[in-house]
Amino acid sequence: MKKRILALLMAGALALGLTACGGGDTSTDADTTADSSSDTAAATGIAADKLKVGLILVGEAADAYNKNHIDGMREACQKNGMDYDSQVVVKANITEDSTCADAINELLDAGCNAIFADSFGHEQYMEEAAPDHPDVQFCHATGYQGATDTLDNTHNYFAKIFEARYLAGIAAGLKTETNKIGYVAAMGKDKNGGVDMDAHGADAKSGSVVAMNVNTGEVLCTANYPTYDLNALVAGGKEAITILSDERNLLLNYGIHARGTPGSIFKMVTAMGALSEGELKTNERITDQGYYTKYNQDLSTAPKCWIGKNYRYKHANQTIVEGLSNSCNYFFYELGSRLGEERLYRYSAQFGLTSKTGIDLPGEVRSVVGSQNTLYDTSKAMNEASQDTSLPIIVFNSIKKHLRNCGASKNLEYDDERLSVCAKRLMDMAVNYDESYWLDNMRTILMEELNMTKEMVYLQSVIGDTYNYMNDIKWGGGQTILTAIGQSVTTLTPVAVARYVCALANGGYVYNVSIIDSIISPDGEVLSQRKPQLINQLEYADEYLPYIKLGMKGVVDESGTASKYFSGWAYREEICAKTGTAQVTKIDLENNGWFVTFAPYDKPEIAIAVFIPHGYSGGETSLAAKEFIDWYMKQKNLRTTDYTLPVGNSIAP
């Protein structure tokens, strides 16, 4: 009964979290949505003819992508009775060398009362400027502007975004209470026109929460959203058909059947590995230097931290505690580089993130952590059931198609079996040999397997694409540092993440997960009593986990990445937490949102993992866990009476 009550509460908390992310039922009345949101407040709208809009673009205005953006804005202006030439000011090529802060000041000087940007990197600068300019609307299109199938569609999509999610929002007067970056048109619906302005996280349609006893591995409760009426499913009929045909796959247990890229919630693995291996001292300080160029010197693609250039000083001289609290990617790129692929994978395994959890439910999916064998395992069959990711199959088929086309251009026909053998040999060679040996080996394989001539195997048209495909399944340092921050090909289940957080909370003990406490006969006889099953104990946990816990505690403190979600909360000092915002793709769906936490801080009892696919950010996802912890902590003082429940087929006293 207790677990049932917990599960019901958890489901409600998860629904709350999804609502905060923008998912869930979107049929709410427009007036209610605009008026009842805790994050918005009515403000005076700006008429279209009074608008002067500043548009900030990353690249040159003449770039094909930006040209389509501008065309989209022209279209939106025309439809809303605005004169583009006099009411829009464009600041293009706003990169690290030409700061967004400078561009914002120039737009303000030009009299702009609304500033619209197209890149996530601009958010930091707009957030800094907004409080000093309460009469100016700030908004950016991250999560929206890239969601197009082709470049040709960009201007149509951008027109829709600018019109429906920005102009209508200004007209409705929607603005955040703090007047930080407004996401103006992402906060509700226009009370007058009823224009749909989905919030960030609008792609969030499902989610999972798992809560566990940190000292036993026992699942206290697990909840999915959306849920369904089991009675309706059993009864059959139209309601059952509706449940079974729901595109959100209502019968899927997301806690054990779904995997997602974890993002920053993985950083505690990297931290523990670096500390335990002596690659990081507890008092060592690392400063964010901007781009991390050890494995990629091209600044257009080199990885860097999420924080903007003008705010990088906040990530200076960080110990492991500040590195975690700030969730500094640069810090963990460096740790990942020091650890390397093998040791990073080994510590992931020690936390139970590369194996099933042992939960007493059928069909559990195994989590996977990035490594060469995860990316492509040469010892396994070339199919999705054997490989950990679909990428090897994609590369395999791409190489075959490319070589078939190369042969056709020379009036040569290769049968499928020969192409399969050749593609497999090429891929295996790429994994087993240093890249400096590839070209000679590629030519040998092509001549042996496909009887290509020497002239043919020296053609760039043959070698070039084949080489690029092979590179996709070759692990390198660049992949390792991405794994260190929870990206690359790493995907974890919520239940595996919850077990990992238990180990962080309980001093390094990793248990098999159990959902059954005991099996009792109808007569009350205990047929089977489950005991906690310890599968690993982390070495050096007593020495280094306290630093990791301090870093996680800082996540919800004043300067932490989740501070605004816990400001003024009664149990802020009682929890350790970590947010995770994992990129899905650069041009498609919004980021996955993760939030992990345990409480109470001094003597942990429960650990919670929340996963909302396409939930926009880990901070938004935290609201579900926050609601549950709030209830749990309030109940602690009430749980003082033991009740004896009746045995089967008997009457309760």
Image (tube, rainbow, N blue to C red):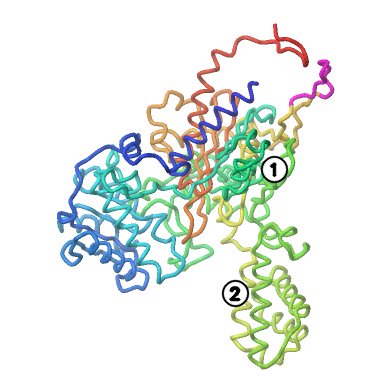
* Residue 496 appears in the picture as rendered: no
Mark 2 or 1, nearer chain start? 1
Q: Residue at x 68, y 60 (%)?
A: 372
Callout 1 crowding tier (Cα within 10 Å): few <14, some 14–19, many ≥20: many
In front: label 2 or label 1: 2
Decide: is 387 above or below 321.
Answer: below
Q: Residue at x 68, y 88 (%)?
A: 407
Which image quarter is the C terminus in? top right
Q: Quadrant of residue 526?
A: top right
Residue bearing mark 2 = 468
Magenta residues span 517-528
Q: Residue 631: image x %, image y %?
A: 51, 23
The amino acid type found where label 1 is placed reads Gln
What mark, if any, has residue 365 been given in the picture? none
Q: Residue 160: image x %, image y %?
A: 34, 59
What mark, if any, has residue 350 been given in the picture? 1
Q: CA distance from mark 2 to mark 1?
A: 34 Å
